[in-house]
Amino acid sequence: MHHLTKSAAETWPAHLGTLIGQGVAAIDTPALVVDLDAMERNLATMAAFAQQHGVKLRPHAKMHKSATLARLQMQAGAVGVCVQKTSEAEALAAGGVDDIYISNEVIAPHKLQRVAALARALAARGGRLAIAVDSLHGVQALAQALGPGENLIDVFIELDVGQNRCGVAEPADVLPLAQAITQQPALRLAGLQAYNGRAQHLRSVAERRAALDAVLTRVQQARALVEAAGLSLPLVTGAGSGTFGLEAASGVFGELQAGSYLFMDADYARNDLDPAQPRFEHALFVKSQVMSASATHVVVDAGHKSHAIDSGLPSVHGLALECTGCNDEHSTLRAATADGALPARGEVLWLIPGHCDPTVNLHDWMIGVRGGLQAGTVEQLIRVSARGALS
Amino acid sequence: MHHLTKSAAETWPAHLGTLIGQGVAAIDTPALVVDLDAMERNLATMAAFAQQHGVKLRPHAKMHKSATLARLQMQAGAVGVCVQKTSEAEALAAGGVDDIYISNEVIAPHKLQRVAALARALAARGGRLAIAVDSLHGVQALAQALGPGENLIDVFIELDVGQNRCGVAEPADVLPLAQAITQQPALRLAGLQAYNGRAQHLRSVAERRAALDAVLTRVQQARALVEAAGLSLPLVTGAGSGTFGLEAASGVFGELQAGSYLFMDADYARNDLDPAQPRFEHALFVKSQVMSASATHVVVDAGHKSHAIDSGLPSVHGLALECTGCNDEHSTLRAATADGALPARGEVLWLIPGHCDPTVNLHDWMIGVRGGLQAGTVEQLIRVSARGALS
C-alpha cells in the first residue's frame, strides 16, 4: 500500500499541525476529513481494474486538486492526471506532478503563453503536457503560443459525445482539426477527448449503457473518417466514475479519466451499481456538530460553504437522518423515519457531500484520518494545492 | 464618498498587484470583479435609508467576508457587522473591525473559549462582541467559557420566526433564556435575533409582507412575555436585503442586518421591488470568456467553482443570453430569443452570480474596478479576509 508523504512545499498552518497524532475528537467542526483507509482501498481497486482491463488510468485531479494525491495515484500506476485549468496544471506541476493533461479548451493568448511555458518546463524534467482543442481558432492560437519547436505538447480533439457542452459538434468535424494539428510541428496529434458528463449520473445501468453506446458510435465515426484520410487518433480518452467500466470494456477507449472513485460522493452513491464496475467506499466527509435542536429537526454547523450541493444534498453517515435543506452555514436534518430519533445538541455528525469536486475546492486542507471515523487518529494533512485555481 | 484604503495586512500576490492601474481587459478570466462605483452607490443608498428610518444598520459580513468592506460600511454609518462563524469574527477583528455580532449559535466548549478571548480583545480596544443563543445549554456553555467577569458579551436570543432552522421554537421559550442570561454576570441580555431567511426570497411583495407580519407577531409575543416578567429585550435585530424596508417601518426592529444590498445578486434581482425599499445595482460580477462555441450555444470558462448556483443560475450582464447550465468549470449559455445572436469564441462576458455570499467565498480576492466594466480601470484589490473561515 502506498503511503502519503509530506512534500517540502506542503507546510501546514500551526493550528492544524497540532492535530497530527490526535484522535478524531480533536478535529474542529466543520472540517473536511478523508478516511485514509477507505481512500487507499479505492485507490487500489481502481488501479487493479485498469490493469486488468489493459487501459491507462489518468484520474481527473480537478476532483481533489491535490499534488499529494496525484502523486499517490501515479505511484499506484496512473500514467498521469487530468486537470481542467491552466492554473491547476501549474499548481500540480509545482507539487511534483510531471504528466498532466488539461482536458479542456484554452483560448486566451496570454494563458496559452503559460501553457507553452509549462509544456517546456515539464518536458525539461522528463514529463509531458497535453491539452484539448475543439476549434481551428484553438489550434492556431495554441501553435502560435508554442512557437517554432517540435513535438512540444500532446493535443486531443474534443468531440461532443452527448453532453452538449464543449467539443466539435459532429464526428465529421474532427478531421479538419486533425489535419490542422498535424501541420503544426509543435503539436502532436494525440487522439480524441470523448467524455459525456451527463452519462455519469444517469441512475440506471440501462440508461448509462445506452448513453455509452451513443458515445462509442460517434467516436468510431470520427476515427474512421480520420483514418480514411491517412491520419490516426492514437488514443481515445474519457470516462468518469459512473461509466468507466463500459469504456474499459469497449475496445475503443485506451484511457480512463475517472476521478471521483477515490472519494465517492452521495451523488454517485445514488447510481445503481453496474456489475461491470467495482464498488467504491465513501472516503470524504465533512465533520459537523449539532448546533441547534428542536422537536422536529436539528441543525448542524456545516452549510454549503462547507460542502457543495450542486448535485444534491449530503447524506449522513451511519444514521437514519435526512438532510432537508442547506444554507450557507447550516444544514437542517430530520429523522428519516416517522419514529426516528434525533441527535442531541453538541453531537458530531459526518456528512457525505453531494459532490466531491466542488466540496474539496471549498477547503485549503483535507484532514487524513487512519483507523476510522469513530476511533481513528489524524495521520496526515493533505493540502488542496489548486484550491481556487480558476484561470 | 468613502474610498477604499489598503490595510497593512492586505498584501496581495505579485501577479495581482500588477493589475492596479490597468484597464479591465488585463483581468484574467475567470475573476471576481467589483464595480466600485455601483458598490459605493449601494453603500450610500443603504446608509441613507437606515438614517432616515432611525434604525441601526449592522450589515451581514458573511456576504463579503472582507475586513476592508466591513470598515467601509462602518465609515458610512453602520454600527458594526454581523458574521455567522467564530473564525469569521476572528478574521474581521484581525482586519481592524471592532464591533462584531456572531448572529448564530456556538456550542463547542473549545470554540466558546475563542469567543471569550475575542470578546476580551475587542473590549480592550473599545469594541464589542455579541452572540446569539437558542438554548439553556448554549447560555450555560457561553457563561462557563467567559468566566467570572462582568458584562463581557452581548447576547441575543434567537427566535424562530418562520425559517424553521435555528432559534427557540415558540415566543414563550424566550423568557426562560432571558432569565438565565440575566443570572450570568458575564452576559448582557441585548435583545432578540429574529431573521426569516426564507422571507427574503419570496418573489411578490404581498408574500414578503405576509411573512413579515408573522415575524412581527411572534416578536411582539415574545417581548410582551419577557416584559411581563420584569425584564426587557433592548434591541430586536434581523432583516435581510429582501425585506428590510418592512422591518425598518415596523417600529419593532431597531437594527437591520441586510448584507447583499452592497453587491446585489441575480436571485435578489428576481424579487419584485417593494416600494418600501430603494433599488440597488448589481456590483459583483464574474468576468468570463467564451472558450467554446457551437451553432446552438456557447460555453464560458467560469463554472460553479467560480460562482455559486445554490440560489439559481447566473444572469449575463447586458446581453440577451440565458444560462442553461453550470458545471464545475463551465457555464453554458444560449440566446434568450429564437433569433438572438451568440457571442464569438474569445469574447468577454460578465456573469451576475446567482448568490453573492457563497460566490465571494470561492475567491481570495475581489478586483475593484473604477469607471465601469467596459472602459474602467483596476483601482483596488479587496481581500476576502474570511474566505474559507468555516469554524
Image (spheres, coloured by chain):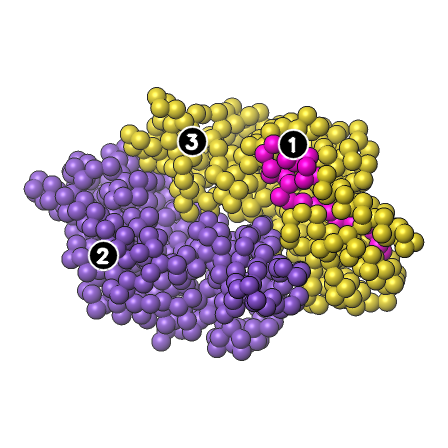
Chain colours: A yellow, B purple
Say if A69 sits above or below A272 in the image.
below
Residue A322 — which label?
3
Placement of the C terminus of chain B among the 4 image quadrants? top left
Say if A241 sits above or below A371 in the image.
below
Q: Secondary structure at mark 3?
A: strand
The residue beneath circle 1 is: A206
Cα separation, mark 2 vs mark 1, equals 54 Å
Residue B247 — which label?
2
Classify residue B205 as left or right of residue A302. left
Picture quarter containing residue B163? top left
Residue bounds of the magenta highlight: A187-212
The amino acid type of the residue labelled 1 equals Ala
Mark 2 closeness class: few <14, some 14–19, many ≥20 residues within 10 Å = many
Mark 3 closeness class: few <14, some 14–19, many ≥20 residues within 10 Å = some
Q: Position of residue B362 (x, y in %)?
A: 51, 53
Q: Secondary structure at mark 1?
A: helix
Q: Position of residue B233 (x, y in %)?
A: 16, 48
Q: Position of residue B77 (x, y in %)?
A: 28, 67
